[in-house]
Amino acid sequence: MEMQELELVQIIALHGDVETIKIVRDKKTRICKGYAFVEMVDRQNAEQVMEALDGADLKGRPLVINIVEEAPVAAKPPTYIKLRPSNGPFKPKRPRK
């Protein structure tokens, strides 16, 4: 089933406020893989869409909607450098594997 982002947004936006949408496509052929990620403004909007559209018929196929909580992005740990007094010419250590 081939669908464009605009078509999907028009269907979903009737039931909640859409922030972003990404239809997942094959990298080489650009053919839709059959699922998409839709970011809603808040959880309440996501629940409204799920209640209204989960199981609904979309181009002959049942629509399955799952709410997925996005994991918070962890802050990148700081990078530390080690300074030491020189005992002659500096020879860098090989990185550990």
Image: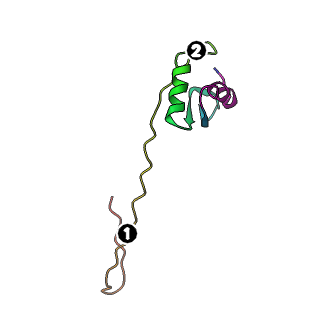
Q: Residue at x 51, y 32 (%)?
A: 44
Residue 62 to residue 40: above or below? above
Question: Closer to the camera, 7 or 80?
Answer: 7
Region in magenta: 2-16
Foreground pick, 43 / 73: 43
Q: Is residue 51 magenta?
A: no
Q: Which kind of residue does numbered mark 1 sit on?
A: Tyr
Residue 14 colored magenta? yes
Q: Which mark is residue 91?
A: none
Residue at disc 1, secondary structure: loop
Q: Which residue is mark 1?
A: 80
Q: Work out whether mark 1 precedes mark 2 in sequence or the reverse, and give the earlier one.
A: 2
Residue type at the position of mark 2: Arg
Residue 89 at x, y percent in the picture: 36, 85
Local crowd at mark 2 within 10 Å, few (<14), some, or many (≥20)?
Answer: few
Give the secondary structure at mark 2: strand
Q: Measured along the vertical axis of the image, is residue 84 above or below residue 35? A: below
Q: Position of residue 61 (x, y in %)?
A: 58, 14
Residue drawn at x 33%, y 58% is 97
* Picture residue at 30% right of the left edge, 86% below the top: 87
Is residue 25 shown to the viewer in this render?
no
Residue 61, label in figure: 2
